[in-house]
């Protein structure tokens, strides 16, 4: 039996989770949004596409929505580049809702309808305690046996929308792998902060959602412990691109590399965000705000007004906000190193990994990597450098962005042209070979 510490599915990472209504009331073609989404390609196409027969589709349209899923996926599913996971109705407190979802699953997976060969799994919302997860799993098993599918062949993803579901995640390591269930089919743990807020009876002065950093941490931790993939919930302000980026950066620092996408534009941002940048760059903490330095003729230039630097007869005067420091050259370098951070490119990461691999082959367990730059502030240039010790733990940590790149390249050939625009051919080839 495969250890739950190992990923058991083909995809090791999911960057984008894109939902689409399955049936639009009042439209001549109720399936038009499904037909548009299934045509997405390249960076506009999500890693996981979710024809949403739950919240995104009106209750009176869900039977038609299930039929639309069958029609669209049976015709176009073979050419869709990501995975397809319809979301069905389910509720931990409503047996009738669970039965409806089960009937839709039976209909959609019927081999005679032609869609199931292109469907990777289903998304189950509103789960409760671990017993409720097992009920859903049993429905999957019944469906597989009813239609002659291999047991466990359908992946199950769940949306964490209640305190019960959050606590259930802690039980996964103990429950997965027992002969009484097929919970190894679990794939994604997806946060649903809107319904979670309702379940928690949370109130904010503005009515906006709380950030729920703890929920996102707990979901990422549970996914890591159980060999699954964590995905954050929807970011409703679809015009706030920088806010979406900030949310993704915060998630990525927790190990949650995937996020819900509501529009093809958000899909593009979600697909690109976890990938290493094309060019490395320096960030300067300018009085509490990270500012990207501008590269000019080999210099990293700060052009803002929060920090200034003046060279004097006795050294330097560095002003950060209201603080003014008189420093000699060594003290200035130390102060600047405290407020400077380097964001490595894919090429930088591959270079460092290759250098460490060569050092290991030569019998060395740790090496020093030097980062150096010429910083310019207020027209004054300062050379800075720092040494970072690389050992096996550092090497393993830096493998994550490269492993993500490798997973994307192997599973999303439709994005090869987009990746070729970001990185040159040599970097791509080296990135596909390093760390293996």
Image (spheres, rainbow, N blue to C red):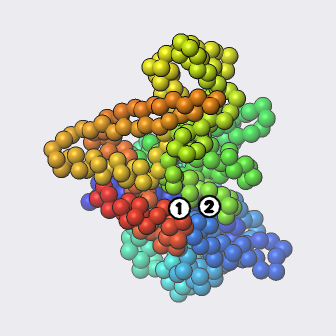
How far, Cα to Cα, is label 2 from label 1? 14 Å
Q: Nearer the viewer, residue 12 or 369?
A: 369
Closest to the observer: 297 or 276? 297
Number of numbered discs visible in the structure rendering: 2
Direction from residue 195 to residue 363 in the image, left or right = left
Q: Residue at x 67, y 21 (%)?
A: 321
Q: State the residue position of label 2.
A: 268
* Quadrant of image for the N terminus: bottom left
Secondary structure of residue under mark 1? helix
User: Height in image: 104 above or below 213?
Assistant: below
Question: Is residue 378 depicted above or below 161 in this figure?
Answer: above
Q: What is the x, y in percent for residue 183? A: 41, 58
221 to 40, vertically: above or below: above
Q: Nearer the viewer, mark 2 or mark 1?
A: 1
The percent coordinates of residue 319 (x first, y second) are: 63, 19
**Residue lying farthest front?**
313
Q: Could you tell me residue 138's position as x and y percent?
A: 45, 63
Residue matched to label 1: 422
Quadrant including the C terminus: bottom left
């Amino acid at each position: 039996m495969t250890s739950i510490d190992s990923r058991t599915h083909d995809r090791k990472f999911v960057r984008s989770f894109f939902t689409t209504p399955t049936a639009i009331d009042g439209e001549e073609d109720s399936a038009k949004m499904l037909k548009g989404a299934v045509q997405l390609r390249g960076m506009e196409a999500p890693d996981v596409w979710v024809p949403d027969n739950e919240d995104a589709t009106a209750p009176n349209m869900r039977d038609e929505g299930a039929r639309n899923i069958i029609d669209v996926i049976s015709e176009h599913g073979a050419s869709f580049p990501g995975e397809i996971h319809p979301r069905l109705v389910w509720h931990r407190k409503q047996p009738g809702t669970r039965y409806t979802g089960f009937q839709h699953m039976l209909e959609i997976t019927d081999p005679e309808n032609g869609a199931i060969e292109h469907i990777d799994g289903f998304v189950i919302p509103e789960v409760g305690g671990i017993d409720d997860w097992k009920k859903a799993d049993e429905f999957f098993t019944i469906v597989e046996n009813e239609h002659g599918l291999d047991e466990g062949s359908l992946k199950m993803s769940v949306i964490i929308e209640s305190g019960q579901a959050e606590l259930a995640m802690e039980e996964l390591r103990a429950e997965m792998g027992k002969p009484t269930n097929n919970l190894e089919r679990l794939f994604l743990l997806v946060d649903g902060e809107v319904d979670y807020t309702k379940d928690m009876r949370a109130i904010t002065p503005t009515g906006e959602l709380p950030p729920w950093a703890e929920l996102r941490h707990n979901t990422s931790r549970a996914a890591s412990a159980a060999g699954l993939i964590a995905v954050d919930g929807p970011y409703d302000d679809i015009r706030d691109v920088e806010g979406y980026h900030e949310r993704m950066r915060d998630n990525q620092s927790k190990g949650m590399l995937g996020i819900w996408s509501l529009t093809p534009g958000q899909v593009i941002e979600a697909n690109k965000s976890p990938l290493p940048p094309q060019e490395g760059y320096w960030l300067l903490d300018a009085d509490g705000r990270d500012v990207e330095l501008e590269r000019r003729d080999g210099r990293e230039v700060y052009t803002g007004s929060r920090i200034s630097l003046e060279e004097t007869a006795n050294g330097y005067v560095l002003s950060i906000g209201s603080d003014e420091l008189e420093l000699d050259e060594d003290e200035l370098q130390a102060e600047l190193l405290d407020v400077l951070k380097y964001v490595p490119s894919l090429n930088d990461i591959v270079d460092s990994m290759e250098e460490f691999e060569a050092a290991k082959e030569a019998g060395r367990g740790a090496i020093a990597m030097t980062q150096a730059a010429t910083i310019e502030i207020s027209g004054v240039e300062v050379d800075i450098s720092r040494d970072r010790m690389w050992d096996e733990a550092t090497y393993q940590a830096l493998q994550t962005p490269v492993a993500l790149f490798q997973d994307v390249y192997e599973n999303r050939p439709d994005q090869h042209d987009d990746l070729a625009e970001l990185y040159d051919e040599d970097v791509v080839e080296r990135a596909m070979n390093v760390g293996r």
